[in-house]
Amino acid sequence: SSEREEEGDSLGRIFRNMVTINRTSSERLPSSSTCFNLLKLPNYKTRRILMDKLRYAIKANAGFELS
C-alpha cells in the first residue's frame, strides 16, 4: 500500500472517532461532547442544511450545560 493510502486511512479513523451522525430530528442543532472530542450531527437531508445549522450553532456562542 502507498503512503497516501495509509495517510487517508489514518485520517478516516480519526474522523470516525470524532463525528457521529444521529438519526434524530433534522430540526435539532449539532452538538458536541467535549470530553470525548465528539461532534454529534443529526442526519440532515442536504449539505446546505448541515452547513447552515453548523454555522448557526458555532455563532450562537452558547456555553455548555452540566447534567
Image: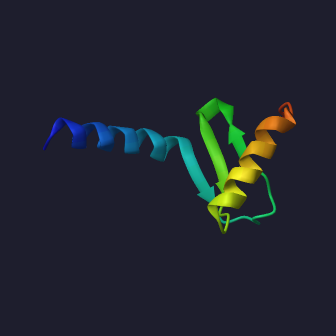
* x and y, in percent, of residue 61 in the image: 85, 32
Residue 42 as seen in the image, left or right of residue 17: right
Residue found 58% across the figure and 51% down from its top: 20
The residue lying toward the viewer, choosing from 67 and 65, is 65
Q: Position of residue 4 (x, y in %)?
A: 23, 39
Numbered marks: total: 0
Q: x, y (%) of residue 2?
A: 15, 40
Nearest the eye: 18 or 61:
61
In the foreground, 23 or 60: 60
The C terminus: image quadrant: top right
Q: Quadrant of the N terminus?
A: top left
Q: Is residue 67 visible?
A: no
Kindly identify the residue that appears in the image at 72 percent across and 47 percent down.
Answer: 54
Q: Is residue 60 left or right of residue 33?
A: right
**Res. 22 image quadrant:** bottom right
Residue 50, placed above or below residue 46: above
Q: Is residue 13 visible?
A: yes
Quarter residue 36 falls in? top right
Q: Position of residue 17 (x, y in %)?
A: 49, 43
Residue plotted at (19% across, 35% down): 3
Q: Residue furthest left?
A: 1
Q: Is residue 66 left or right of residue 44?
A: right
In the picture shown, does residue 6 fall above or below 29? above
24, 57: nearer the viewer = 57
Q: Residue at x 63, y 60 (%)?
A: 47
